[in-house]
Image: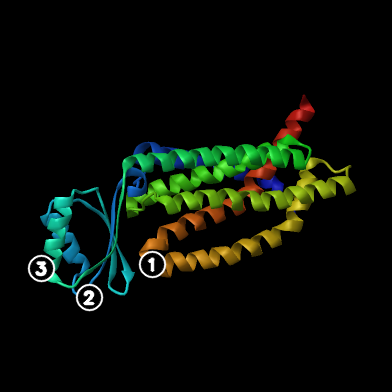
């Protein structure tokens, strides 16, 4: 199977996705949740207060209700900007007018400083992960072109994931929160996983058939690992698709982020990482 003859197509697809992601981020940006901007989280249990009641009460008290999620069992999770003690008392009074016996299950306030700290730690984690993977894969395969290719493919997936959430935020209101950070870091792992498996097969074949050039070697390695990679990814994709379609509001966007990351990781291991290795090998041969 001559998959590597599709390298120009893979390049065109990747450039299109990367350009779309960059343009989306530049023009639309993101919709950060209170995990990054700071604010308050309030979980309430009541059989009499509906979602419309919550929206009406917050509007009446001139408090911007950022998000409201139904957790089932008459539980609602409300997210809004940080409020004063007097404002919270006013909300309590309004809620008691509808349901005297409503229960406050949780109330947390998150400052903007903690939100910025989470963002800084996320960026630091991505940079540190990229550096360690570059060094580990480079030393493991005794060839830093493998490490460079794996890291570039990983960053390719991360950028597309972020661009996708910019689009989802613009059209569907998807917000960046701490779960999105988890999804990004998971994407880094899933992106490298299939790539390393294919790289390892290339190394084994190189020892057995050192006469083959890198294109034929890559085709043979991809052909032998493709079925395993697709089967492995499809089991995850089916599960995540079910969560996106049938899951609750609190996990839907997290599952969507993981789904995008897994699809990108499966594609990039073949369409980005391997072509980059071939490019670096041809370039070094010319030198």
The residue to which callout 3 is attached is: 97
- Graded by Cα atoms within 10 Å as few (under 14), some (14 to 19) or many (20 or more), the crowding at tag 1 reads some
**Residue 207, percent from left and from top:** 88, 46
For the point 35% across and 46% down, the residue is 32
Which residue corresponds to the image point at 60% horizontal and 39% vertical from the top-left?
Answer: 130
| Residue at left offset 37%, top offset 42% | 114
| SS at circle 2 | loop
Q: Is residue 12 visible?
A: no
Identify the mark at residue 47; answer none if there is no mark. 2
**Circle number at residue 100:** none
Q: Nearer the viewer, residue 246 or 103?
A: 103
* Residue 251: percent from left, percent from top: 42, 62
Q: On the image, which quarter does residue 93 sit in? A: bottom left
Q: Which mark is residue 248?
A: 1
| Mark 3 to mark 1 CA distance (whole Å) | 29 Å
Q: Give me the C-alpha separation between circle 2 and circle 3.
A: 14 Å
Give the position of the C terminus as an image quadrant.
Answer: top right
**Disc 3 versus disc 1: nearer the observer:** 3
Query: Which is more N-terminal, label 3 or label 2?
Result: 2
- The crowd level at tag 2 (other Cα within 10 Å; few <14, some 14-19, many 20+) is few
């Amino acid at each position: 199977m001559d998959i590597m003859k599709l390298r120009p197509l893979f390049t065109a697809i990747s450039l299109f996705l990367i350009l779309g992601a960059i343009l989306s981020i530049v023009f639309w940006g993101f919709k950060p949740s209170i995990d990054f901007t700071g604010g308050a989280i309030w979980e309430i249990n009541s059989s009499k207060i509906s979602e419309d009641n919550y929206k009406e009460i917050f509007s009446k008290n001139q408090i911007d209700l950022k998000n409201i999620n139904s957790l089932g069992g008459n539980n609602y999770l409300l997210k809004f900007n940080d409020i004063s003690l007097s404002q919270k008392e006013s909300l309590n009074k309004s809620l008691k007018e509808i349901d005297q016996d409503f229960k406050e299950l949780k109330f947390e306030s998150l400052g903007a400083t903690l939100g910025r700290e989470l963002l800084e730690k996320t960026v630091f984690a991505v940079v540190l992960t990229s550096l360690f993977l570059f060094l580990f894969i480079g030393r493991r395969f005794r060839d830093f072109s493998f490490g460079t290719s794996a890291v570039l493919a990983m960053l390719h997936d991360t950028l597309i994931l972020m661009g996708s959430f910019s689009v989802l935020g613009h059209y569907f209101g998807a917000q960046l929160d701490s779960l999105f950070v988890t999804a990004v870091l998971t994407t880094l792992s899933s992106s490298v996983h299939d790539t390393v498996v294919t790289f390892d097969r290339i190394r084994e074949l190189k020892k057995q058939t050192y006469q083959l050039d890198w294109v034929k070697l890559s085709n043979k390695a991809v052909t032998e690992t493709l079925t395993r990679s697709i089967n492995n990814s499809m089991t995850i994709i089916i599960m995540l698709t079910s969560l996106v379609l049938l899951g609750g509001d609190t996990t839907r966007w997290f599952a969507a982020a993981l789904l995008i990351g897994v699809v990108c990781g499966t594609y990039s291991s073949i369409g980005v990482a391997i072509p980059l290795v071939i490019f670096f090998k041809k370039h070094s041969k010319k030198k």
